[in-house]
Amino acid sequence: MANLKDLAIQLFDIQAVKFGTFTLKSGISSPVYFDLRVIVSYPKIMRSVSEFMWKAVKDAECEYASICGVPYTALPIATCMSADHDIPMLIRRKEAKGYGTKKIIEGHFSAGDKCLIAEDVVTSGSSVLETVKSLQDEGLVVTDAVVLLDREQGGSKRLAQNNIRLHSICSISKLMLILLEAGKVDQKMVNQVQKFITENNTFNPEAKPAEEVKKVLTYVERAAQCTHPLSKRLFSIMQEKRTNLALSADVNTAAELIQMADSIGPYICVLKTHIDIIEDFSADLIQKLSSLAAKHNFIIFEDRKFADIGNTVKQQYGGGMYRISEWADIINAHAVPGPGIIQGLKEVGATKNRACLMLAQMSSKGTLAKDTYTAESVKMAEGNKDFVIGFICTEKLSSDPAMLHMTPGVQLSAGVDGLGQQYLTPQEVITNRESDVIIVGRGITQSANPMQAAKEYQEAGFLAYQALFN
Ligand code: S5P
C-alpha cells in the first residue's frame, strides 16, 4: 500500500485533485476541485484509497455490520472495502425503483444493525447525512463515516451534531502541504486554498440536527404523494372536513352504532368499528352504515386486528358471518405471523381497493410491540405499500409521506383506565408524536354529550395539525 504522500501525489497526477477556478454545486467559486470519479480508471489507486479507509476505521475500532458508500463516487470504494475485508455491503439507491419491491436500500440487513458510511469527499456533510437518513428510515443505525478527503468546511462538525464521527484520511490542509513539498503547487496556491476554506465554512452551530429540519407537509401535499386510492381519499377528507379525528364506536347494538355514525359523522374522517361486539349484527346494519359513510364522507375501519396465518385470515376477512372485506375500507393486522398475513389479506382485499394498517405499536401498558418488533412491522408495511397504507402506532414511524399514522389511546387529558389502556392528549399525539389521526373511543362515546365531545376532539386535533406550520 502506498503511503499517504504517494497517494496524494498520484491523485494530483490523475487529476482527481485540480487547481484553478471552479464553480461548485453551491454556486461558489473554488480554487480547488476534487473529482474522485476518475479513480475507477486506476484500479491500483482505487485499492490504495479503499485500504486507507479500511485501516482508518480499523484503527478507530469502529463497530459496524455493513458498509454503504454514498452514491455514486464512493460506491466502488465501498465495494473494494467490502470485497477485500469481507464486510457485507448495502447499496442506497438515489431514487426508489418504480417497480418491483421499490426498495431504496439494497442488500440484507436487520433493523438495529450498524452501518458504516464511506464517502470520497466531505464538504458540508449534507450528502453523507442524506444517505444516513435513508438508512435510518430502514431501521439501520449509523455512528461512523469514513472519508478520503475532508475539505475542512464544517462537514465533521455537522456530522458530529448528528452524532456521527467522521474519520478522514486526509484533510485539505495536509494535502496542500504534501503537494507543496512535492513541488506540485506553489505557496501562493496553498494560501489561496487556505483563504477559501476559512471564508467558506458551512457549519452553523445553531443548525438543528438534520432530522429536525424536515418540512411538514399539508394533507393536500400528502394526498398528492399517495399511490393507494384509499390513503389519497383519506388525506383529502381530512383536509375537506378539517378533521383528523377517528371515532372508535365501541357500542354494543346496531341502533347505537347507527345513531353514533349519523350524529358524529360530520366531525370525523374515519369510523372505527369492532363489529364482533355488536349483539344484533345484520346485513341491514352494514347497509345503513355504508350509506352514512357516503352521506357524511368518512371511511370505515373495522378494527379486526387479524393475527393468524395467511390462509386463515383470508377466510376471516372474506367470509364468515361478517364478510368484512365487503364493507370495511380499512382493516388492521398484527405483524406477529410474518408477511404471509399481508399476502393472505391482500388476496381478498386488493381487488376491492381495500387497505390495511399494521399494528406496529400498541397503546396498552406492557405491550410487546416495541423496539425490534416495531421496526420489523414497519419494514413489513413498507414492503407492501400496494395494500398497507400505514400504522396503528403511538408515534410517527415512517418518513414516507404517503404512510398514515393512526394513534389510539387518546383523551382530552392524559391518564389510564383500569385495564392497561394509556391515554395521550390530541396535542401530544399530533405535535410531539407526529402522528396523523387521533382515534378516540370512550372519550366521546361515554361523554354526557358525545356530539359536543366529538366537536372538541375534532377542534383539538385539527388545531394541533395547523400549529405544525407556525
Ligand atoms: O394499541 C391499540 C390499538 C387499538 S386499535 N390500542 C387501542 O386502544 N386500540 C383500539 O382503540 C381499542 O380496541 C379501542 O377500540 C380503541 C380505544 O378506545 P378508548 O375507549 O380507550 O379510546
Image (tube, helix red, strand yellow):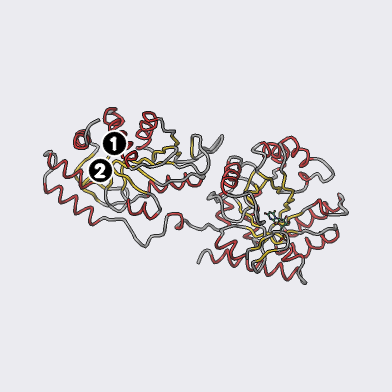
- As measured in the structure, the alpha-carbon distance from the residue carrying label 2 to the one carrying label 1 is 10 Å
Q: Along the horizontal axis of the image, is 384 left or right of 71?
A: right
Residues at badges 2 and 1 in contact (C-beta under 8 Å)?
no
| Mark 1: amino acid | Phe
Q: Is residue 236 above or below residue 107?
A: below
Q: Quadrant of ligand 1?
A: bottom right
Numbered mark located on residue 427 in the image: none
Q: Along the horizontal axis of the image, is 184 left or right of 322?
A: left
Which mark sits nearer the N-terminus, 2 or 1?
1
Residue placed under numbered mark 1 in the picture = 52
Q: Position of residue 165 (x, y in %)?
A: 36, 48
Q: Position of residue 232 (x, y in %)?
A: 62, 51
Label 2: element kind: strand
Numbered mark located on residue 170 in the image: 2
| Mark 2: amino acid | Cys
The quadrant of the picture occupied by the N terminus is: top left
